[in-house]
Amino acid sequence: MSKSIRSQWVVILFVVVIVLVWILYYVIGSPSFNRNNAVSIYGTVIQGMSALLSVALAVVIFRIQSLENRNQSLEQSTLDYIHRITQWTYPQWIPSLEENIRDRSITERYSQSHGTSEEERNLQQKRLEETLNLHTATDQRIQRTKDRIMITLAFLITPILMSFFLLMVSDAFASLVTFYSVSTVILLSACGIVFLILTVLDSLP
């Protein structure tokens, strides 16, 4: 089972558990909920999620930069290697470079210049293809991290904004409505934490 499929199943499992706990919390807590506790809960959510949001941004930005730096280092070392064995110069990592790796143009040029054996050509080709695969995988990991962090930020920011708004109007709501609002804020916060954890784990090698 691939890492992405495992991550999807983990997301589904966590969401199901969170929803079941939320329903149980709603059934047990709604009859005896004290509306005065809502203000304290909103304040805690605002402080906690705001702190988590700042940490999440710092961690994910650092991780993305780390992956991008790794790819840049890989690109430069590969460009230097290709120039050394073929005298071909690429200004940067471009699609034509990837195509030349796949169609074996680089190793064929080296073979023509140095008269290498088929075994040596295959070893060079394997090395270049492994480098290309690593570069592609890192690019995909960066893109997945960027896509997931947007979802994560939505789940982290929404409870903060809801709590700010509900703090101002909580006195106008009945106890049941206040309980429903509080439980929704907690549910979104829990989902945000889960998505944040999965985003960070998925960005790891």
Image (spheres, helix red, strand yellow):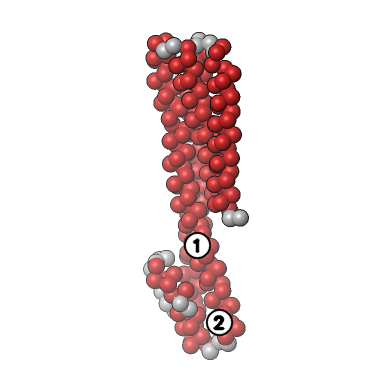
Residue 98 - label: none
State the residue position of label 1. Answer: 135
Q: Which residue is at 56% across, 11% downward?
A: 32
| Residue type beneath disc 1 | His
Q: In the rendering, at what x and y percent does residue 85 appear?
A: 50, 79
Q: Quadrant of the N terminus?
A: bottom right
Q: Is residue 127 above or below residue 7?
A: below
State the residue position of label 2. Answer: 121
* Residue in the foreground of this view, choosing between 184 and 109: 184
Which is nearer the N-term, disc 2 or disc 1? 2
Q: Is residue 200 visible?
A: no
Q: Is residue 18 left or right of residue 68?
A: right
Q: Which residue is at 52% across, 72% downward?
A: 128
| Residue type beneath disc 2 | Arg
Q: Is residue 48 above or below residue 68?
A: above
Q: Residues within 10 Å of mark 1 (few under 14, many from 20)?
A: some
* Residue in the foreground of this view, choosing between 89 and 124: 124
Q: Is residue 98 visible?
A: yes
Q: Which residue is at 59% across, 28% downward?
A: 21
State if disc 1 and disc 2 touch (CB < 8 Å).
Answer: no
Q: Which residue is at 45% across, 40% downward?
A: 151
Q: Secondary structure at mark 2?
A: helix
Q: In the rendering, at what x and y percent does residue 13 appear?
A: 58, 40
Among the 4 quarters of the image, the one containing residue 92 = bottom left
Q: Residues within 10 Å of mark 2 (few under 14, many from 20)?
A: some
Q: Is residue 21 above or below residue 146?
A: above
Q: Is residue 7 above or below residue 192?
A: below
Q: In the rendering, at what x and y percent does residue 38 appear?
A: 49, 15
Q: Secondary structure at mark 1?
A: helix
- The residue at the far bottom in this view is 115
